[in-house]
Image (tube, coloured by chain):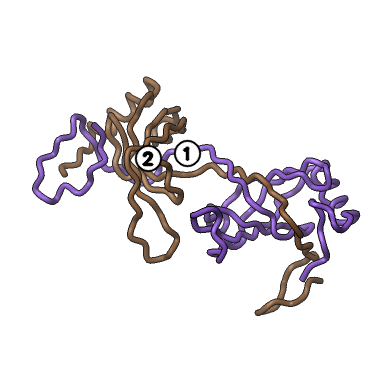
């Protein structure tokens, strides 16, 4: 059993501390929640600030369709955050989207417009 | 033109070329992401690492490493994540603890071998800790 830590160590197995550098790779698809969707881009927020002008191949998930999209990050703004988790609002420009995605976006935009 | 300017309450005319709409739950982008992390400790049931990314508790991810010369891959469930004092490069870093989901045979063998026979004083070695 590992040495107890504050509050009591409930671990079932002994931990082995890594001495020196031991890198690893963690794969965790990043979710970017869509706030506003347009035919030419989207406003999203996520936990990781993507570099401005970075281009990414992403998967767009809408209620009616899942499609690939190539986007360019146009702006990144830290969001006011009370939890300290740090999220970022990002504007994405569509560089390329599939016809299916285009149709689904047009449907979404056509059915609920935002007047801002 | 992009739908980026959301602060349009300032009276400035909306110059967007295309229509846009607010989107409810159930719509998102997924971006395949791989992050290089530094392992802090390892046990038969999980690991801890320092990451430039905060991982929400309960998040599922996969981790790859070379343990004692053998490839190790595991799916993990994040148990906790806390801001770390030491920044990674210039950005904030986080210490993350995660539990292994069921391991494949090869990775289980690699983990057992690494934890049992790792010799001291090598670059990739483990020491009975804490």
Q: Are marks 1 and 2 on the same chain?
A: no
Q: CA distance from mark 1 to mark 2?
A: 17 Å
Where does the image place residue A105, in percent across and percent down from the top left? 31, 30
Whether label 1 touches label 2, CB < 8 Å: no
Position of residue A59 relative to residue B74, above or below, is above
Q: Determine whether, in the image, residue A91 is placed left or right of residue A59.
A: left
Q: Nearer the viewer, residue A4 or A16?
A: A16
Q: Residues within 10 Å of mark 2 (few under 14, many from 20)?
A: some
Q: Chain of mark 2?
A: A
Where does the image place residue B96, in percent across and percent down from the top left? 61, 59
Q: Which chain is purple?
A: B
Where does the image place residue B90, in percent across and percent down from the top left? 49, 54
Q: Nearer the viewer, residue A66 or B88?
A: B88
Position of residue A13 relative to residue A38, above or below, is below
Q: Which chain is brown?
A: A
User: Which quarter of the figure is the N terminus of chain B placed in?
Assistant: top left
User: Which quarter of the figure is the C terminus of chain B placed in?
Assistant: bottom right
Pick out the residue farthest to the bottom.
A7
- Residue A113, by quadrant, is top left
Q: Determine whether, in the image, residue B57 is placed left or right of residue B48.
A: left
- Residue B125, by quadrant, is bottom right
Q: Determine whether, in the image, residue B75 is placed left or right of residue A40.
A: right
The residue sitting at 82% across, 62% down in the picture is B127
Q: Chain of mark 1?
A: B
Secondary structure of the residue carrying tag 2 is loop
Q: Which residue matches tag 1?
A: B30
Where does the image place residue B116, in percent across and percent down from the top left? 89, 56
Q: Residues within 10 Å of mark 1 (few under 14, many from 20)?
A: some
Q: Which residue matches tag 2?
A: A52
């Amino acid at each position: 059993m590992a040495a107890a830590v504050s509050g009591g160590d409930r671990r079932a197995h002994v931990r082995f501390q890594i001495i020196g550098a031991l890198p690893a790779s963690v794969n965790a698809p990043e979710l970017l929640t869509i706030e506003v969707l347009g035919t030419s881009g989207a406003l999203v927020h996520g936990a990781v600030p993507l570099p401005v002008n970075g281009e990414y191949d992403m998967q767009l998930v809408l209620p009616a369709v899942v499609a690939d999209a190539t986007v360019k990050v146009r702006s990144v703004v830290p969001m006011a955050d009370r939890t300290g988790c740090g999220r970022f609002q990002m504007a994405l420009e569509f560089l390329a989207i599939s016809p299916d995605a285009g149709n689904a976006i047009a449907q979404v935009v056509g059915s609920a417009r935002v007047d801002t | 033109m992009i739908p980026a300017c959301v602060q349009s309450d300032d009276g400035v005319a909306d110059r967007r070329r295309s229509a846009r709409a607010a989107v409810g739950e159930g719509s998102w982008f997924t971006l395949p992401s791989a992050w290089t992390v530094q392992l802090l400790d390892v046990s038969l049931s999980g690991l801890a690492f320092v990451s430039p990314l905060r991982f929400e508790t309960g998040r599922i991810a996969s981790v790859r490493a070379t343990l004692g010369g053998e490839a190790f891959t595991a799916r993990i469930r994040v148990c906790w994540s806390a801001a770390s004092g030491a920044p990674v490069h210039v950005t904030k870093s986080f210490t993350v603890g995660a539990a292994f989901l069921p391991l494949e045979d090869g990775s289980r063998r690699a983990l057992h071998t690494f934890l049992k026979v790792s010799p001291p004083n090598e670059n990739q070695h483990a020491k009975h800790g804490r």
